[in-house]
Amino acid sequence: MSKTGTNLPAGPQKMTPSEAFVETMAANKVTDIFGIMGSAFMDAMDIFAPAGIRLIPVVHEQGAAHMADGYSRVSGRHGVVIGQNGPGVSNCVTAIAAAYWAHSPVVMITPETGTMGMGLGGFQEANQLPMFAEFTKYQGHVNNPKRMAEYTGRCFDRAMSEMGPTQLNIPRDYFYGEIEVEIPQPHRLDRGPGGEKSLDEAAELLANAKFPVIISGGGVVMADGMKECQAFAERLGAPVVNSYLHNDSFPASHPLWCGPLGYQGSKAAMKLISQADVVVALGSRLGPFGTLPQHGMDYWPKNAKIIQIDADNKMLGLVKKISVGICGDAKEAAIALTKRLAGKTLVCDATKTERAKTIATEKAAWEKELDEWTHERDPFSLDMIEEQKKEKTPTGGHYLHPRQVLRELEKAMPADVMVSTDIGNINSVANSYLRFERPRSFLAPMSFGNCGYALPTIIGAKAAAPERPAIAYAGDGAWAMSMVEILTAVRHDIPVTAVVFHNRQWGAEKKNQVDFYNRRFVAGELDSPSFAGMAKSMGAEGIVVDELDQVGPALKKAVEMQMKEGKTCVVEIMCTRELGDPFRRDALSKPVRFLDKYKDYV
């Protein structure tokens, strides 16, 4: 058996359904699967190793599905997760939802109760297809053992063609028996640039644009089209902004890069796109959360013409009114548009130098503001800062301002780094500071926004790219949801670095209690022992940081341990309880009370 795929001769052969299942995965070059062993698929699991497939056992199946997500987003290949029928499978739902909104080609394999027990309420029985119906692009149910290879191959094909998770549901008794089958070879789409008519219309709009701006979205990353986006931007002299949580879609060192839009994004990006008369959304669905007002600016250009390019035609014009919609691959569309503009004199050619100066000025102003923005300035944060000046950390140091910490971490980031971020207040503020030079480097839970995402996802990313430094950011609340996966990293030699912001609170929701509920804090406080200490108890290294000048050296030391010694390390940073802006100010309304007993609760 080949280590990189099946080497069976063409044509039907006698085999068991388990062999057909494993051989079809081998044909799709599967080398790693995340999950927990289970009797439901043990007959197939028994032959993973000779097929060149490693089953990486995790602590919890939600972590397994997050790892498959991280693996696929970094590698550009399938991430595969498997679980025992019933609870093992249901544990994966949240993570598959996150993968869905990240457009990750994750294949969720769900062995099911045996066919003779279905409907009888047996042990670990569940109707597993409805669980994932909302969060999968395709669901394949093996309704006959003879169709095992067919459905397995289709789930792998559809995950890539539909750019999202698929589910392969297999009754556990269908792994056994004798079948005659030919292993299907993978089918991959050759995506084109879009229709000629829509490309011509877009080129015409761009030829007459005075201040074009490009949004480089996740589609650019998935299409491996960063260089083509760069060439497109250079032809126009257009500023390039990253779509929300796709900070790795354009190189941060490029003069035309302006940073991300959306929550806690770049003011430079927002000020520049507000001037646009034509916006090219390249590989972006223009999600509502990524175009909301921010920093007190309603920056979306109301009168600009929008050219939207997306491989999914259902996204075109869904959120924003568009002038031209192109259903095509982001990379190929960028090439096609650049070619159409190559021999033309564009209106914006005359102002290239002037616009370059404007871009540089706005970027410099934003960097200066970030340097000077050492702490949050709202009344609650100022109160917390003053209060915590009197406190010492458990190790005798000082509580640090999150923004200063994030700036120091940014400066200490290694080259070619991969970073995953969890959900939470400090992690969201990190959006202002995370910059990347290459795609497939930034992993966030996207629109689903679930806590407990960062650590398992970066473990999956590291499994896919062991040569790259891997760093997870998490607040103390989110961290506690998945920190047990440190055991997975240690047990299976997948070393990662985690930065835990320890501020003893659920910051994002607590901010709402500050803004809307007169600082009546319910269930928002978190008191925890040392996370660095807990990491050590699990066999990893741990560093506590409570002085600003220790932040950069601690990260560098942890990354050095990861890359040179193969060690996982948790860097626990003791932070003040100050809080950045809320996710969105229109999410809640001021409370109204009619009953006397609640009259003070306004």
Image (tube, grey):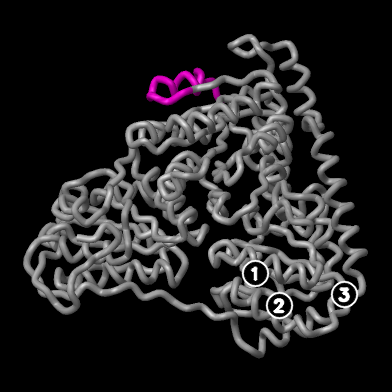
Three-letter residue code for mark 3? Asp
- Residue at image point 65% right, 42% down: 428
Q: Which residue is mark 2?
A: 338
Residue at mark 3 to residue at mark 2: CA–CA distance: 14 Å
Three-letter residue code for mark 1? Glu
Q: Is residue 350 left or right of residue 34?
A: right
Q: Which residue is mark 1?
A: 228
Q: Quadrant of residue 306?
A: bottom right
Considering only vertical position in the picture, is 403 above or below 131?
A: above
- Residue at image point 18% right, 74% down: 9
- Contact between labelled residues 1 and 3, with CB atoms less than 8 Å apart: no
Q: Is residue 54 left or right of residue 338?
A: left
Is residue 601 visible to us here? no
- Contact between labelled residues 2 and 1, with CB atoms less than 8 Å apart: yes
**Magenta segment range?**
526-541
Q: Can you say which quadrant of the picture contains the N terminus?
A: bottom left
Residue 142 pos. (x, y %) = 22, 68
Task: Give SS at disc 3.
Answer: helix
Residue 195 pos. (x, y %) = 60, 86
Q: Residues within 10 Å of mark 3 (few under 14, many from 20)?
A: some
Residue at mark 1 to residue at mark 2: CA–CA distance: 9 Å
Residue at mark 3 to residue at mark 1: CA–CA distance: 19 Å
- Residue at image point 26% right, 57% down: 3
**Quick one: label 1 or label 2, which is nearer the N terminus?**
1
Three-letter residue code for mark 2? Thr
Q: Residues within 10 Å of mark 1 (few under 14, many from 20)?
A: some
Considering only vertical position in the picture, is 534 above or below 278?
A: above
Task: Give SS at disc 1.
Answer: helix
